[in-house]
Each structure stands twice: as C-alpha cells, then as structure tokens.
Amino acid sequence: MKKLVVVVVAALGMMSSVALADIDYGLEVGIRQQSGEVDAATSSAKSQMGFQFGATAHFPISGPLHLRTGMLFTQRPLIAKDDASGDETKISMNYLDIPVALMYKFEEYAGVFAGVSLGMNLDSSCDATGCKVTDVKSPLIPLLIGASFKFAPQLGATLYYESASGEAAKDLKDYRAVGANLMITFD
C-alpha cells in the first residue's frame, strides 16, 4: 500500500505545470456485469448487473503516457444459489474505487490503460433472513484493463475488464466484471 502511494506521489511530482494544463477530466456513469464464485460445496453463483459512477482524470506523464485515476462508486452484487433447495440469496457489496492505471493514448481521443483499482468497502448486505456478509476484504485491489475513447469532443466511453483474485468476503471469491461507462469530459 505504501509503495502504491509513493508511486502516485512520484508520478504527480514529475508533472510540470504545463502538463497540468493538459489534464483530461470528466464524469463517468455506466453498467457492469459482475460475476464471482461461492466457496461452498452445495452452492453456485449467478452473475448480476451493477452500476458504477464517479469522476476520472488523465494526467500526462511523458508523451503518450498518462496516469489515469479518479473516484468511482462501484456496485459488486452477486447471487448465491443453493443447488439443493433452489433458494437464491442476493449479495450486495458497494465500494469506493480509486483506479490507478497507466494509460497509453494513441491520439487525443483514444487510449488503452492497465493498472489496479483500490476498492474500499462502503457497505455490504444480503437479502435472506438472518444472512450477513462477513469478513469483507477492504481494500479490495482488482486488476484493471480497458480502453477509453471519445466519439464527440466532450462525449466518450470507457470499456473495461476487472479481475479480483482471492477472497472478496467469507465464502465469496474471484470477483470479475466487464463494464461500459458513458464519459462526459471537461477538457
């Protein structure tokens, strides 16, 4: 964690005041298809649709390389189905994500990125009687790859894949998501 903070501070420190004038920032809102696994012999997991919204920014580092970061509210829902009885339990975990990714911009309107997202759990719940989500991993640090492009001067989209190996909470593991966000930029 300390290494991540040092890398971000160093990257921000390398940017000149001229580079700060070239910051691309905006708002994003979109949907994601969330999946994962239930660590129980008699249960299986079903994927769920979630939402994501917040603000992102691209800071130029050197030439086409940029630092992509921001703050995003991210839903990570999942349904656990008991294979014997057929009962389904909807599990909901909401996070404040801070993505930190290296972005390569092919041109002013398009680029690809890869990095991590620091996900801090805001709340968790499930809808079955007596059910409680326990041992929620926070921070959750999924790997993130994606592409961002504009199709109009201030409108664009971000497409991404996210993978968090290991436990997300007790009996929940290997969370993955594919998402698409609409982006409104203010550059």
Image (cartoon, rainbow, N blue to C red):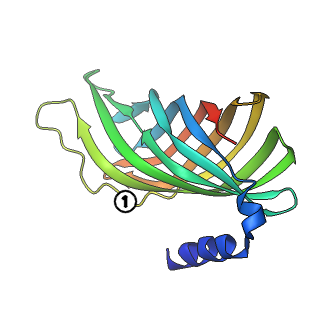
Q: Is residue 77 above or below residue 6?
A: above
Q: Is residue 53 left or right of residue 112?
A: left
Label 1, on which residue? 138
Residue 101, by quadrant, is bottom right
In this rendering, position of residue 160 left or right of residue 130:
right
28 relative to 145, above or below: above
In percent of the image, x 48 and y 35: which residue is there?
Answer: 52
Say what secondary structure mark 1 lies in.
loop
Looking at the rendered structure, the number of numbered marks drawn on it comes to: 1
User: Which residue: 24% across, 35% down?
Assistant: 126
Q: Is residue 41 visible?
A: no
* Quadrant showing the C terminus: top right
Residue furthest top in the image = 86
Q: Could you tell me residue 139's position as x and y percent?
A: 41, 61
- x, y percent for residue 74: 44, 41
- In this rendering, does residue 141 appear at all? yes
Say which residue appears at 33% left-offset and 27% top-offset.
83
Between residues 150 and 52, which one lies in front from this camera angle?
150
Three-letter code for the amino acid on which mark 1 is drawn: Ser
Query: Foreground: 60 or 173?
Result: 60
Residue positioned 67% across, 35% down in the render: 158
Examine the image and state in which quarter residue 152 appears.
Answer: top right
Q: Badge 1, how many Cα within 10 Å: few under 14, some, many 20+? A: some
Q: Residue furthest left?
A: 130
Q: Position of residue 111 (x, y in %)?
A: 80, 44
Closer to the camera, 168 or 14?
Answer: 14
Residue 124, percent from left and from top:
27, 44
